Image: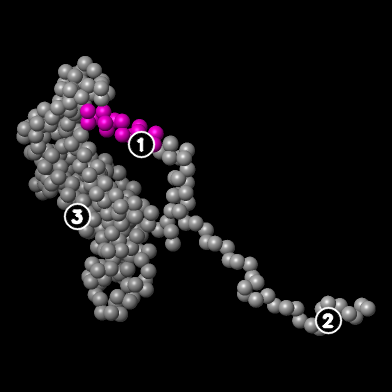
Amino acid sequence: MSGHSTIERGASLPVAKNSDRAPALPPRPGLVSRLTTWLSNGVVQAVLLVVALVWITPLAGLFLSSMRSEQDNAAKGWWTALTDPGQLSLDNYTALFKDSGITQSFWNTVLISVPATALVVGIAALAGYAFAWLEFPGRNAIFLVVVGLLVVPVQIGLLPVAKLFGAIGLFGTIPGVILFHVAYGLPFAIFLLRNYFAEIPREMLEAARMDGGGEWRIFSRLILPLGRPALASLAIFQFLWVWNDMLVALLFADSESQPLTVALQSEMRQFGSNIGVLAPGAFLSLVVPLVVFFAFQRHFVQGVMAGSVK
């Protein structure tokens, strides 16, 4: 009969339990995990290996050239040292360290790069925290001015600042070179750290204030430890820029305060190059940034990846 149906009229349909529901979809992989999966591809690894070899080859050539005599460098290519290690010696480095002009320029580079990096990171950290979390009149307007300074080329300020430094007695001195690097490094540094500090959860700062923490205590005990990756990345970029700079030093430094880049440039001859000095000096100038980069590599990678995974 038609009345005998499996579901009687008016009867309620069974409700599916939570266990009967379709399983939730797994979360989408983040940028870091997708990048790791992509880099694990064999073809990609082969391409990266080729790129690494292309990048390392000039470095290896410079290193081998720095350990060969001028006669060997003029007669044969640097790659011949791979099959004839007898060409290699430390005589060029011994002569380099006995050159008082080169050694003085090396220490001048250290005296310029370290303070310029420390001052930029320290001042930018304080300013970045203020722009991110402190309320004061004109905060947004001042920050817009800082961002606007990012588009000002260094070349525009060379002559006006040189005249200003000449009037106040800083032209041709190491403090003058440091001050110029600090002034032109701060806009980008403040912009970078302000955006990084603004991503810190507000609840953490409010909890610290409820516990009686002042602004300086919050900055030193909370902001700086959390911002270590960004601070390390900024320090690496600033140090590399100052260490490798020649334009600013060429204009603002005299013969007593010139860094290594200017000293090596002055060794260039009119009809050739003084390989016996240039090669070891250039390699020495290159080794220090590499040591700094690899020393802070872990923090640098964390700073680059910061914010990619929420």
Residue 232 within the magenta-colored segment of the rendering: no
Looking at the image, can residue 270 be seen? no
Return the residue found at the far right: 1
In x, y percent, where is residue 265?
Answer: 18, 31
Asked where in the image residue 120 lies, by quadrant, the reply is bottom left
Instruction: Report the mark closest to the observer, 1 or 3.
Output: 1
Which amino acid, mark 2? Glu
Instruction: Report the mark closest to the observer, 2 or 1.
Output: 2
Looking at the image, can residue 53 be seen? yes
Return the residue found at the far top: 75
Which residue is disc 2 drawn over?
8
Q: Residue 6, relative to residue 194: is it above or below?
A: below
Element type at mark 3: helix
Tell me how far mark 1 sits from mark 3, CA to CA.
34 Å
Element type at mark 1: helix
Which residue is disc 3 drawn over?
119
Tell me how far mark 3 sits from mark 2, CA to CA.
83 Å
Asked where in the image residue 137 lies, by quadrant, the reply is bottom left
Residue at x 81% of width, y 83% of height: 10
Question: Magenta segment range?
Answer: 49-64
Q: How many neighbours does mark 2 have within 10 angstroms: few (below 14), some (14-19), or many (20 or more)?
A: few
Residue at x 9% of width, y 29% of height: 95
Residue 54 within the magenta-colored segment of the rendering: yes
Which residue is disc 1 drawn over?
52
Which amino acid, mark 1? Ala
- Point out the tag, 1 or 3, that comes first from the N-terminus: 1
